[in-house]
Amino acid sequence: MATYTLTHVEKKPLSFSVPVLAAAGAFAGLFIGTAQGSGPIGFVGGAVMLALLGLVCLTALSNDKEKIARWLILLGMAAAGYAFGALPGLVVGALFGWFFGWFIYWIGEGRYRANLVPYLTPGQVLWHYSFRVICGMIFFFLITPIVVVMPLSFNAENFFTFTPEMLRFDPAGYSLKHYRDFFNSPDWQQALWNSVTIAPVATLLSVTFGTLAAIGLSSEHVPFKRAIMAILISPMIVPLIISAAGMYFFYSRLGLQGTYWGVVLAHAALGIPFVIITVTATLVGFDRSLTRAAANMGANPVTTFFRVQMPLILPGVISGGLFAFITSFDEVVVVLFVGSAGQKTLPWQMFIGLREQISPTILAVATILVSLSILLLATVEVLRRRSERLRGMSPG
């Protein structure tokens, strides 16, 4: 499909640029005003300020003086931020100044159409960027509660909020005391040890049974494949509290409730659906003629599986295993029902620290777990791209 790039974009009239800039300023001012205790004033002030800035920049400081104008906007907003919020305000103001200095000329000079095909209507262009703004806002509201925990874990006080010292970026307001508490506390270390001994075994069982199930369900001769698949992935669909209650009553009859293997089997049951889904997705592009060729050359099914099939589906197997590991390592509801005090895992200890002791150490533990999850998810993405390359597909 041919792509088009405009080498020259037409400067947009002020009747278009100024209202757009005013709307962007109102949106930013609403957040700043709300943080200062007056959302409506911030809304109106942001709209007026950015509209006036855009009018001045696009008339008196046109394209040939763009760099000077952008520096002036950055320095001006940084100074205003410092006046209202000291050093943190300066940082926020500088970021706003950098963004809006670029945004004014991006809108006013019509550069937003530079990388779009020329035949798009104004409505299509609006939807093109509106869709990206909506996705960005969703991402922001999803990720902010997670990111906010990280700086809080370095709080020098036993608070769950940002202290004045932290907001001033005062080094005295930051400390590693919560991390020291985590590594020096017998209760936390025992919980960590339990998680480390339970999660790998549960992951191994999930990968083994989940991979075999996915390979079996990918066969053309298996009857009732859809019904079997629905049953196998039901732990992902059924509310976790229902699964936990059902496991409690079932494992109690078998004598597994409150035992190590009871918790392992419960976590394996939760991890198997993730393995089935990822391995099944990998098998979609698998060439069945390879296994038939291996069988024709005398290889038995076990040799064919490990020498032919497994190397090609290995990225999907590892991805499913990582998801199963994260599920087991982060799970708390099932272990509350199935486990006992001897199987108190890290999430269980965090739950106790939040409900009974109000321990700020959970902030440090949460930061460690978030960092671990990010690392594992990055590994999953690398493996996904490798799997697509092995199957001759373009990553993405």
Image: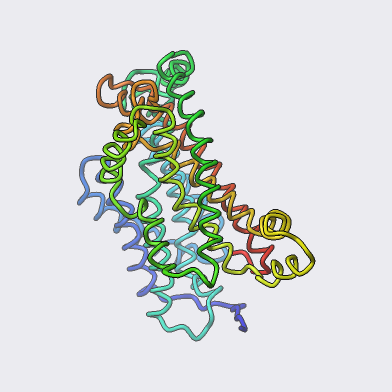
Is residue 220 placed above or below 231 in the rendered structure?
A: below
Please provide percent x and percent y for residue 49. Answer: 33, 55
Give me the residue at 35% from left, 67% from top: 20
Tell me which residue sits at (41%, 69%) in the image.
224
Is residue 265 or residue 61 the one in the foreground? 265
Q: Taking the image as drawn, is residue 84 in sight? A: no
Residue 157 appearing in the image: yes
Q: Position of residue 154 (x, y in %)?
A: 44, 24
- Where residue 169 sits in the image (x, y, percent)? 43, 27
- Please give left or right for residue 320 compared with residue 140 in the image: right
* Quadrant including the C terminus: bottom right
Instruction: Describe residue 177's horizontal placement relative to residue 20 as left or right.
Output: right
Q: Identify which residue, 181 or 77, lies in the foreground.
A: 181
Figure quadrant of residue 329: top left
Give the quarter of the image for residue 269.
top left
The image's colouring method is: rainbow
Q: Nearer the viewer, residue 127 or 241?
A: 241
Q: Is residue 231 above or below residue 170?
A: below
25 lies above or below 175: below
- Quadrant location, the N terminus: bottom right
Q: Report how many numbered discs are placed on residues in the image.
A: 0
> Residue placed at 58% from the left, 55% from the top?
316
Residue at the far right: name it. 297
Q: Position of residue 176 (x, y in %)?
A: 47, 19
